[in-house]
Amino acid sequence: MRPTLRQMEYVVAVHQLRSFGLAAEVLNVSQPSLSNQIAAVEAELGVRLFERGRAGARTTARGLEFVTRARRILSEVEALRATMRSDLPFGGRLRLGVLPSIGPYLLPQAVRALHAEEPDLRVIVREENTLSLDEGIRNGRFDAIISTPEDHPNTIQHPLFTEPLWVAVAHDHPLADRDRLGAAAGRAPQRGAGDAAGNARRGPKDQPAAADGPLGVLRAPAGGNAP
């Protein structure tokens, strides 16, 4: 059946490295052999996957579509092989994508607990931006991602934690005298956030607020700066 898995690997490698020579070297095959195999795929499908030039190999629009689908197929085949060889979850290999802003704070504890429960499970972590994480979870490159839920619609989501946020205001700011601060008030500074209950409890007059939810108030003492 064409294209074969090997041919898909060749095409993906050339796309990633933008070079037939480098791809051949990485895959440990001769460049003529690799070029012939890709030419065979192009002839079979009747499309041009790459534009060859002095600057290297540039993937065409149809080539990009091929690479996207080939990656998905290769990922599924690799997952199938791993699952058949192991009784561990995810076939013994968890491919986890995380946001750079979250990973350093959450992963040490999470991975430690995961290894305690599944010591033989291999966890592969990649830090990527939101768009790349969304593409990865949809095309099978990741088994799971840790990210902001609103950026990944139509996915199965599980909340991991809630994070308290603070709003710093001057001593004479209208919000400084509020006993409770909800989402509506939090919209004033444009970057505020509110919890479902929409409440935060104010502490003593010259102390930071003790927040019930994710939005608290820090007030500066009269004539001073916010702590």
Image (cartoon, rainbow, N blue to C red):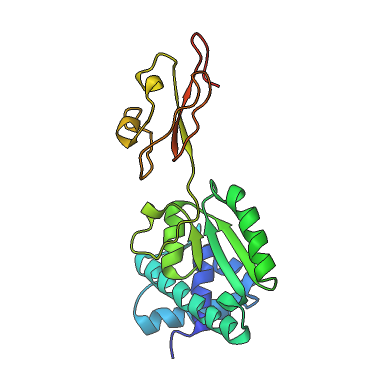
In the displayed structure, would residue 205 be above or below residue 60?
Answer: above
In the displayed structure, would residue 204 be above or below residue 147?
Answer: above
Quarter of the picture containing the C terminus is top right
- Residue drawn at x 51%, y 69% is 143
Asked if one can make out residue 17 in the rendered structure from this viewpoint, the answer is: no
Q: Nearer the viewer, residue 147 or 165?
A: 165
The location of residue 38, given as percent across then percent down, is 48, 78
Task: Give the residue at the far bottom of this rendering.
Answer: 1
Q: Nearer the viewer, residue 222 or 14?
A: 222
In the displayed structure, would residue 189 be above or below residue 146?
Answer: above
- The quadrant holding residue 159 is bottom left
In the displayed structure, would residue 175 be above or below residue 35?
Answer: above
The location of residue 198, given as percent across then percent down, is 35, 39
- Residue drawn at x 50%, y 71% is 12
The location of residue 22, given as percent across then percent down, is 60, 66
Q: Is residue 203 left or right of residue 196?
A: right
- The quadrant holding residue 116 is bottom right
Q: Nearer the viewer, residue 124 or 178?
A: 178
Q: Nearer the viewer, residue 211 or 30?
A: 211
Q: Is residue 37 left or right of residue 121?
A: left
